[in-house]
Amino acid sequence: MEISTERDGGTVVATPAGRLDGSNAREFQDALDAVVQDTERALILDFEQVSYISSAGLRVLLVTAKALQGNGAELALCSLDDPIREVFGISGFDSIIPIHASRADALASVKG
Amino acid sequence: MTYKILVVDDEPDLEPLMLQRMRRQIRSGRFEFVFAGNGVEALEKLAADSTIDMVLSDINMPQMDGLTLLEQIPDVNPNLRAVIISAYGDMQNIRTAMNRGAFDFVTKPVDFDDLQVTVDRTLAHIEEWRAALDSRDKLVALQNELDVASKMQQSILPTSFPKTSDYETFGTMHPALDVGGDFYDVVRLPDQHIGLAIADVSGKGVPAALFMMSSRTLLKGTAISFDDPGQVLSEVNSLLQEDDTDGMFVTMLYAVYNAATGEFTYASGGHDAPLLVQPDGSSTLLPLTGGIALGVLPGHDYKQTSHVLQPGETIVLYTDGVTEAMNADGELFGIEGLREYFANKPPVDSEGTSQQVMQAVADFAGDAPQSDDITCLTLQRN
């Protein structure tokens, strides 16, 4: 899975695309693992181009959040469309991963 | 490794010639030759020695010719490959031989350098073929194990459901092709109480199936030890944390129904909200209780809330296999799709309602492949 990334100081913004489900969870995980290695302060996942996330995709986010935490960094999400935002609400994942309306908001919050 | 080659020719000269020209390969242990004078003798040798890797055969021979031999080889060993030695320019026989499954041919007079190349290529093909067969066998074995896992999952689901004149329950699950992680359970509790659980483990495959089994066992044990659904989820959550869950989690809704009063008390751990359906088919989503999926956050305190069921009301619990069922156009069924369905077909009894949900999802999805377990558990107050 190709994930384009941009770097802003110690923060990396990654933009996954398409469906994040059981069929590509392994690739998604591998791609994020590589990004986590390069992240000093925070990883922002811009969900602008994500159309669907299943529980297998959520699991990858959970593993990623834990890995970042272990390195003293944090994970944040931004630009989720309504159905995906709802998945985070129902599963309660919005209480452990900060979710921002826009990329600018997410960048501002991690720079705090 | 040594390859054993059966050479079939009625010309007695070929044997010493072959042994002489291939002496280096024989000495190095790469080739070993076996000889036969015609097709009948060749079949006898093949039947007696299963370690022969390939056949090198002349066409014109007494008793049984090379073309007939080609037809009979697969009956003895379908994984053997044969190379035919034909007269130069005899395209008719060469074509017949290839049609009968010969892998390649060389022409007379035999050029031994060319023969060497042809034999090497044939053996390389045999190696690839064997590797492919091996992979296929392993795949079949793995598939069998997954089938066993899938059957185990099905077998732990309850098959009989509490039903009295006051209320009835019914659960059903359509598993996806892969072993996945949905389950439901109905637990008979003291004093006319019953526990109802529905859950969805993240991911698919054997790890998800194992996680589902342990989640289900923990739930069952906890459900009979604590009265409050919130407390049950808190307890299961902390027990799950004791194992390394490798990022796996389970969304679970657990409810206790008091048949004496109609009170339905539930706690959601990251699971979809219960749908309350009226006898006329209209419906509302009951509020969520703000709990996070189990296995994610140690020490999380799960809250509960309750609704008193009125006679005729039905509670529908479901997994995201229902709401995220997709049709060929890539549209999701959604909770709105389910509500619309009930608006047109109001529930009659609990069993019928569960089957109705399955039918509604199947109708919507049409020929689109099912990617997730579809699970539904219903409770109706009579």
Image (spheres, grey):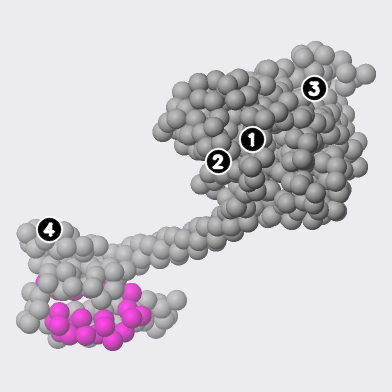
Q: Are marks 1 and 4 on the same chain?
A: yes
Image height of B41 relative to B120, above or below? below
CA separation, marks 3 and 2?
40 Å
- Looking at marks 4 and 2 on the same chain, the residue that comes earlier in the sequence is marked by 4
The residue positioned 85% from the left and 46% from the top of the image is B227
- Please state the chain letter of the residue tagged with numbered disc 2 in the rendered image: B
Judged left or right of residue A74, residue B312 is left
Q: Callout 3: few (<14), some (14-19), or many (20+) C-alpha neighbours within 10 Å?
A: many
The residue positioned 20% from the left and 81% from the top of the image is B43
Residue where numbered disc 3 is placed: A99
Residue B188 on the magenta segment: no
Query: What x and y, as percent, mark residue B320?
Result: 62, 34
- Please state the chain letter of the residue tagged with numbered disc 3 in the rendered image: A
The residue positioned 75% from the left and 20% from the top of the image is A78
Residue where numbered disc 4 is placed: B95
Towards the viewer: A86 or B22: A86
State if disc 2 and disc 4 touch (CB < 8 Å): no
- Looking at marks 1 and 4 on the same chain, the residue that comes earlier in the sequence is marked by 4
CA separation, marks 1 and 4?
78 Å
Picture disc at residue B178? none
The residues colored magenta run B36-59
Judged left or right of residue B174, residue B34 is left
Image height of B138 relative to B165, above or below? below
Residue where numbered disc 1 is placed: B382
Residue where numbered disc 2 is placed: B351
Q: Callout 2: few (<14), some (14-19), or many (20+) C-alpha neighbours within 10 Å?
A: some
